């Protein structure tokens, strides 16, 4: 399978996308911005989103031991991104992500650190945009 994101050979693309889909559905339905995010990731990983969404959800707790540390952390990172992609990080999404972190064997502290890092990252991106748009 071709991995266009160059994440590494030990990255489980299918598990990654199945978890993103479950987070997007945590508040009842996949929002258009969440759908775009997941579909983009699927294309970059050469996977068919339409097939994945029809499959049963992944039993993450029993599957987590098969995932590399990198896969677990990328899942956590992008689940948090999914929570923010529609500019509304709901309590349902936050709880789902905390549960996912736990199922992956990651701590609540890991989730908080990742979220804080992402917020800082996004802040720097916005500052970069401001600097580039200066006249």
Image (cartoon, grey):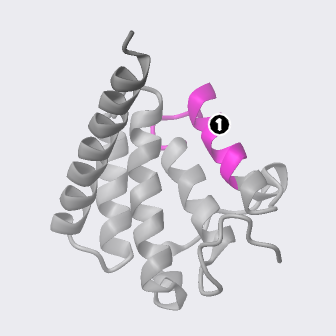
Most distant residue in the bottom direction: 65
The quarter of the image holding the N terminus is bottom right
State the residue at coordinates (60%, 87%).
10
Residue 31 in view here:
no
Foreground residue among 7 and 135: 135
Quarter of the image for residue 5 reads: bottom right
Image position, residue 2 (x, y; %): 81, 73
Q: Is residue 91 left or right of residue 16?
A: left
Quarter of the image for residue 122 reads: top left
Image position, residue 73 (x, y; %): 40, 70
Image position, residue 97 (x, y; %): 35, 55
Image position, residue 110 (x, y; %): 22, 67
Q: Is 102 a magenta residue?
A: no
Which residues fall within the magenta stretch? 25-41
Q: Is 40 a magenta residue?
A: yes
Most distant residue in the top direction: 135
Most distant residue in the front direction: 135
State the residue at coordinates (61%, 81%).
8
Q: Is residue 46 left or right of residue 82?
A: right
Foreground residue among 58 and 125: 125
Q: Is residue 57 left or right of residue 121?
A: right
- Give the SS element for disc 1: helix
The quarter of the image holding the C terminus is top left
Q: Residues within 10 Å of mark 1 (few under 14, many from 20)?
A: some
State the residue at coordinates (47%, 64%).
75
Residue 35 in view here:
yes
In the rendered view, tell whether residue 37 sits above or below residue 63: above
State the residue at coordinates (65%, 71%).
6
Q: Which residue is mark 1?
A: 35
């Amino acid at each position: 399978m071709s991995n266009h994101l160059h994440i590494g050979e030990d990255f489980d693309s299918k598990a990654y996308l199945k978890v993103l889909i479950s987070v997007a559905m945590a508040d009842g339905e996949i929002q258009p911005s969440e759908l775009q995010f997941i579909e983009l990731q699927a294309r970059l990983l050469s996977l068919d989103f339409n097939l994945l969404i029809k499959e049963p959800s992944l039993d993450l707790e029993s599957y987590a031991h098969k995932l590399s540390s990198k896969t677990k952390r990328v899942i956590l990172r992008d689940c948090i991104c999914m929570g923010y992609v529609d500019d509304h990080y709901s309590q349902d999404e936050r709880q789902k992500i905390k549960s996912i972190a736990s199922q992956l064997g990651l701590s609540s502290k890991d989730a908080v650190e990742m979220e804080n890092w992402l917020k800082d990252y996004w802040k720097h991106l916005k500052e970069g945009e401001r600097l580039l748009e200066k006249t």
